[in-house]
Each structure stands twice: as structure tokens, then as C-alpha cells.
Amino acid sequence: MKGILNFFTAGKPAPLIEDNSKIDALYKKYRWRVMLAITVGYGLAYPLRLALSAMKKDLIDGGIFSAAELGSIGSALLYSYAFGKFFNGILADHANVKRFFTLGVLLSAAVNILIIGTTTLWVWIILWGMNGWFQGFGAPTGAVTLANWFSNKERGRLYGIWSTGHAIGEGLTFIVSATIVSFFGWQAGFWGPGVFGILVAFGIYYFLQDKPQTLGLPPVAQWKNDTSSKASDDNEELSSTKKSQMKIFKNPAIWVLGLSSALMYVTRYAINSWGFLYLQEDKGYSLVEAGGLLGLNTFAGLAGCVAYGYISDKLFNARRPPVTLIFGLIEVFSLIVIFFTPDGYHTIITSAFLLYGFTLSGLLATLGGLFAIDIAPRKAAGAAMGFIGIFSYIGAGIQDQISGILIENGTTIIDGVRHYDFSNAIAFWLGGSVLSMLLALSLWNVKVRN
């Protein structure tokens, strides 16, 4: 056991390289590689957690599970992800992230392959819950990697790029998984991502690196001559990583940020988890059409993440709240258009989905981690990310259970045909975004840790 723990522990600093040209070359080489690993690798591993979304109608119509039961299965992943992201975030601050992240993706892939062997409800709840815990290795790894390889003045832009990973993953899930399920059945929606996830894990292991110091490189603040980062590093050397992590629990702004993120995740996972069913039953789209629309929405999020980071860094001097307000107002407006536009106006609905995806991804970038990393000590980047994750995914999990019940209660069967009334669910989903925006506004004057 001690040998296993040592294998996953962060490496010790190597002798410092004295040649500045070699330092520059190594930093330039590895920085793009670690960004590729935490962005593309994270995105390609994302379908392992969203596989269930594309097959809900098939599972309900086939009499395998009800909407309420699917809500329980989905919430098991989200609840375990919430706490897994937090505890794994604490571990990530101490871990060799290269090995840590790879293990999480491999275990998540194994769950996706194993789950097709049964349709017993309690087994699905346990396995899908385990999947959530393993998925919780990814986001803290990204936060720690960003903190170790990029300076404070770069953080907003690079965080925005990294945040495109979830949009890549969601887009792949909604388009590819919907097509696979349509042609090969719901089981293929699990084993396809599972097999692909194993390949992704090997790619992550190849590209990702531990801390720069393990390669003989100086801290990134010193290399970039970022005085604000350097001051932070010098101060934090006086305290241990554990003490730095404890500071996040004493910061009221992080608690408010967590609640705001939780409410935004109500809306996010309502669309992710129930969007297929809603578009098929309420708007008349086919499974593949719904997947294409949801995929288009998430690909718009690629631009949204980058735009949020760039706008907040360059136009607002790294102030997040003003940009959050702008994005929040547009996001709420786009949801109103999506939910209340009559059937048949597909161009308007598509445009609204593009706008929603663009703004939501920017909001997720800041509420789900960027602002917390701004506020928290550098040595507690993983823990801060994980702490916000608890709020975010408890909100998402509660959403899945409540949405399942609301949809189930709004379902009637006439002449053997199911008819859905989504009005109560829509009020719940939209309300999450509005309340999230109001809470985020309360952080307008919060100061960022330099």
C-alpha cells in the first residue's frame, strides 16, 4: 500500500537547470503539452459521465427504468462526483497529476463497460455513483496543473481555454452518442465511450507532466517574472499546503460562489440530462436531431469559455463580476426563448441554443472554478476547485432527482402513448439561473488574492 501511495505522490524537485535557454525551451515544450492533456484529454473523457443522457427515452419506452428511477441513477453520479471532486481536489494538491488523472479515466471507462451487464436498478445506482467518483479526478488535476504551469496574469485566458474541455466532451456525447444509440441500441452508448476512454487515458499519460520543479525548472512565477504570483508564492512558503487549504473554508465569498455555482448547475444539468427527452417530446425533434442541436449548443461554449477569459482579463483587468452579469442576463434571455418559442420555429430555437451555450460556458468557467482560484491561495487550487465542486454537483444531483419526479408527475398515458407536461420542470430549471445570477452579483466587490 505504501508503494502504491508513493507511486501517486508528487515527485521531488530535480536539480535546478542553470541554462536559461534550456529552461525556456522546456517550459515552451511542456506547457502546450499539459494544456493539451487537461483540455482535450478532459474533453474526450467527458462522454464517460454523460452516456446515460442520450438513451433515456429508449430506457423509458422499453420499460427498463422510469423517469424517476433514471433521476436516481443520474443523481448518484452527480452526488458522488460532488464529494469525489472535493476529496480528489485535496489529493491532487499532493499528487503526481500525470498518474492521478490517468487512473481516474481508466476506472471510469471500466464502469461504462461493466454497467451493460445488468439492468438491476440498485446495481446501476452503485456503478454510476462509482463513475462519478472516478470522474472527480479530472477537474482538480486541471486546476493544479494551471496553478503550477501558468502565472497569475495568464490564468483567465488559460482557464477559459481549459474550460472548453467540457464543451468538447458534451458536444461529442450529444452528437456521437445519439447516433450510436440510434443505430446500435442503448448498450452501445456505454461500451463505445468505455473502449474509447481507455485510449484517451493512455494519451493523457503521454502528454501530462507533474510540477515544473520535478523537471529541474524554476517556479513559473519566477520564469515569467510575474511579481504578483511571486509575492503569493513567497508568502505561501511560510505555511503548509494543508494550512493553505484550510483558508478556503474561512472565506465567505467562496461559500457564496459555491451556492451560485450550484444553482447554475441546476440549469446546466437539466439541459444535459433531460434535454434529449425534452426536445424529442416537447419540440418534436428526432434523437439524432436533438443530439445535433445540443452538440451545436456545447460547441458554441468553446467560444464562450475563451471569450469570458479574454474579456475579463483584457477589458476588465481580471475582474470577473461585471462579465458574469453580462453573460448571466444573456443566458437567462436565451433560456426564455428556448422554452417559450412555439413548435416549428427551429431557426429561432437553434439561435437561442447557440447563445445559451456561449454564455453558459463562460459562467461555468468563472462560477465553477476560475473565481475561486482567483480568491484562494495558490497551494490550495485543487481544494478550492473541489470545494466549489461539492456545491455544484450537489445542485446538479438534486436537480436530477427533482426533475425526474416533476417529469414523471407531468406524464400521462393516453391510448398507450406517453404525453409529457414540462411546465413545472421548466420553472425549476429557469429559476436556477436567475437565482445564480443574483447571488453572483453579491460578489461584485470581492478582492482577488494577488
Image (spheres, rainbow, N blue to C red):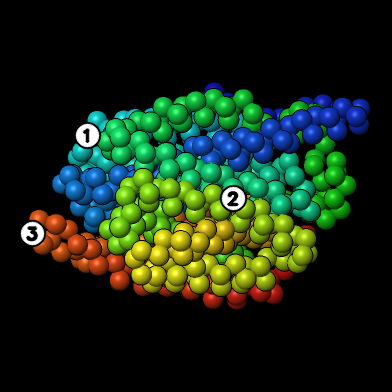
Q: Secondary structure at mark 1?
A: loop
Answer with mark 1 or mark 3, whichever residue precedes in sequence: 1
The residue furthest left is 415
Question: On the image, which quarter does residue 449 sit in?
Answer: bottom right
Label 1 – label 3 distance at C-alpha? 31 Å
Asked which quadrant contains residue 101, the reply is top right
Q: Earlier in the sequence, mark 3 or mark 2?
A: 2
The residue mark sitting in front, 3 or 2, is 3
- Return the disc, 2 or 1, that comes first in the chain's sequence: 1
Q: Nearer the viewer, residue 121 or 238?
A: 121
Is any atom of residue 422 visible in this view? yes
**Amino acid type of disc 3?**
Asp
Q: Residue at x 80, y 42 (%)?
A: 220
- According to the image, label 1 marks what residue? 118
Left or right, 72 with reference to 354: left
**Amino acid marked by disc 2:** Leu
Q: Are marks 1 and 3 in contact (CB under 8 Å)?
A: no
> Residue visible at 30% across and 44% down?
55
Q: Quadrant of the image for the C terminus?
A: bottom right
For the residues labelled 3 and 2, the Cα–Cα distance comes to: 44 Å
Packing grade of label 1 (10 A; few <14, some 14-19, many >=20) is few
Residue matched to label 3? 415
The amino acid sitting under disc 1 is Thr
Q: Report the disc number at residue 302.
A: 2
